Amino acid sequence: LCKTMLLLRLFFIVSFVFLFNQTYRILLLSGMRVPFLRLLKRTDLSVPYGWQLSSARRALHLQEYHSKQLLDNFGLTVQKFIVVEAAEEAAVRLHKFVANEYVVKAQILAGGRGKGRFDNGLEGGVKLARSPKQAIEYVKKMVNHRLFTNQTSSDGILVKKVMIAESVPIWRESYLAIMVDRTLESPLIIASPSGGVNIEEVSVKSPELMLKLPIDLEVGLSPAVALKIAKFLQFSENATEKVARDEILHLYEMFVRTDATMIEVNPICETTNSDVYLVDAKLHFDDNASFRQREIFSLTDLSDRNPRELEAELYGLNFVSMDGNIGCLVNGAGLAMATMDLIKLHGGEPANFLDVGGSADASQVSHGIEIISHDPKKYVYDEFLFDYLQVKAIFVNIFGGIVNCQTIARGVIAAMEKIGSRLPIILRLEGTDDLTAKRLLRESRHTMLMANNMEHGVSLSIEAISSDCRKTKGAKTA
């Protein structure tokens, strides 16, 4: 009887703990705040079997002129500006837009514009013009030309729009950002009186010039804290209160109301007249909030996006194109980074990577292989643009936890039915149903290379490119 009672007690305790954890998971996954359960860390909770979370998605990035329009809508101070698509349009509109000097900026979704280079030889995508005539000349040299920066691929980005803003006399530059801190689970304000420079360098060389303040979402940003931040930014006495009241508080309001993941203003400037301007800002928004931020997401400019990335998104996949010759299909961003690092360590170069996540079916995998194999690159020669196919081999690197290796195998086989055997395909499959997956690959009539582990797969991929053959010494063929 004692043993029975003990077992019953144990059963009830286990059941209670199980139900408690499941309830907490449900609350977390539904997005509800559960402050009284903070003792349980979110990272310690696994997703129940059979549940599917929305996969990581690309945060929305806006063109600079869209960011300025949004800042202005929330009462923040920005320079006057116009956006043009041709030199002729600039000539007409500059008649009514009078300024002592103009800043002419190519509009692309990539950083490093100031140090970039155009395909026609123009140096820099950000230019200072001292007259309307000079501004029009810069527009003519920027529009419909490709801009190459340290953040673009080797084919650069075609410039379709140029922003012309009034230049303001800057007395001092500061840095201000609001972002989501995933560790603290709250917004984090970062401020520094050293703006207009690489803020990472400031944080390393002069950490005393960095202020980091977590903000409780339920309390919000108070005027007193905003004033503290404004004083730290070292604006003049005349401008400090205005910065706190009109800029910092409004910026935080915008961050919350737009479901932003980051608003970075670098620099926020004070002029010689004690006026304050948000000269340059980067805005990122949570894609998962698109259903309630329709107006913002309608501003998305797809013309700068790689068409293969857009195609992948249609199938619920994440695709990133690079400049190498080894295509990679993986499950999970961590595995993708490890795969690319290992490829580079062995002297290879990844051409792209496609993340199938944890819930992909065979059809998605098949489409993924097709997208990887048809990823054209571009190069410029004598001002002419040429396309060429650079992917020479495909490395399928899967660690089957949630994802089923058998599903991957069926997708690869289906893809090879369509694209044939023009590219060597190397597979490393480990985890759920890997033995069944390998049997399916062996029974198919297609020739592929099976790797024993990830490093072996990388070696086979590089060797397959160098020998341009389907069978490699020491490899198992499926």
Image: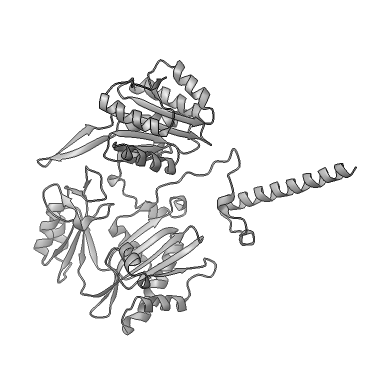
Q: Is residue 106 visible?
A: no
How many marks overall?
A: 0
Looking at the picture, tell me which residue is in the foreground, 41 or 241: 41
Residue 466, image x, y percentages: 26, 27
Looking at the picture, tell me which residue is in the foreground, 423 or 378: 423
Residue 353, image x, y percentages: 36, 38
Q: Is residue 42 visible?
A: yes
Q: Quadrant of the C terminus?
A: top left
Asked which quadrant contains residue 311, the reply is: top left
Q: Residue at x 81, y 47 (%)?
A: 9
**Left or right of 87, for residue 79:** right
**Left or right of 123, for residue 180:** right
Q: Residue at x 36, y 39 (%)?
A: 342
Residue 265, image x, y percentages: 33, 65
Q: Residue at x 41, y 55 (%)?
A: 285
Q: Quadrant of the N terminus?
A: top right
Asked which quadrant contains residue 66, the reply is: bottom left
**Left or right of 108, for residue 9:** right
Looking at the picture, tell me which residue is in the foreground, 210 or 56: 210
- 382 over 427 or under it: above or below: below
Asked which quadrant contains residue 205, the reply is: bottom left
Residue 219, image x, y percentages: 53, 70
Residue lying at the far front of the rendered structure: 474
Instruction: Tell me how the rendering is colored.
Output: one colour
Residue lying at the far bottom of the rendered structure: 237
